């Protein structure tokens, strides 16, 4: 028997059902741990960020890039 989807065929032979769409979507979505960077209070104004960093005694992290934002150069 030729199977177009070998994984699905193996699961069916083992008596397991194929994953539902919700399970597949949940498996590729980022976890709350992976989305922690969204909690960082990002600043768009460099001078304000520098002043705030100096007042609070916290380091200043600069995200600098060169080129197309999608990497298409």
Image: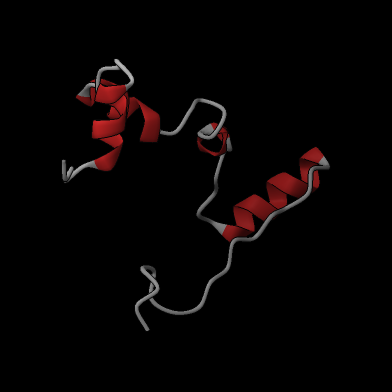
- Tell me the quarter of the picture where residue 68 sits: bottom left
- Report the coloring of the rendering: secondary structure
In the rendering, at what x and y percent does residue 35 appear? 50, 34
- Which of 10/18 is in front? 10
Asked whether, in this view, residue 13 is left or right of residue 45, the answer is left
Q: Is residue 63 above or below residue 26?
A: below
- Tell me the quarter of the picture where residue 2 sits: top left
Residue at image coords 58%, 37%: 40
- Which of 47/61 is in front? 61
Asked whether, in this view, residue 41 is left or right of residue 28, the answer is right
- Tell me the quarter of the picture where residue 69 sits: bottom left
The answer to whether one can see residue 51 in this image is yes
Q: Quadrant of the N terminus?
A: top left
The answer to whether one can see residue 19 in this image is no
Residue at image coords 50%, 25%: 32
In the rendering, at what x and y percent does residue 66 appear? 50, 78
Q: Is residue 47 above or below residue 36?
A: below
Residue at image coords 74%, 47%: 53
Q: Quadrant of the C terminus?
A: bottom left
Residue at image coords 59%, 61%: 63
Q: Residue furthest front?
A: 1
Q: Residue furthest right?
A: 57
Q: Residue furthest bottom?
A: 73
- Which of 43/64 is in front? 64
Asked whether, in this view, residue 37 is left or right of residue 22, the answer is right
Q: Is residue 10 above or below residue 20?
A: below
- Which of 51/21 is in front? 21
């Amino acid at each position: 028997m030729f199977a177009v989807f070998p994984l699905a065929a193996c699961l069916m032979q083992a008596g397991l059902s194929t994953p539902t769409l919700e399970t597949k979507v949940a498996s590729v979505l980022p976890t709350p741990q992976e989305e922690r960077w969204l909690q960082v209070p990002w600043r768009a104004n460099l001078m304000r960020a520098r002043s705030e960093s100096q007042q609070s005694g916290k380091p200043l992290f600069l995200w600098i890039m060169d080129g197309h934002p999608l990497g298409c150069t």
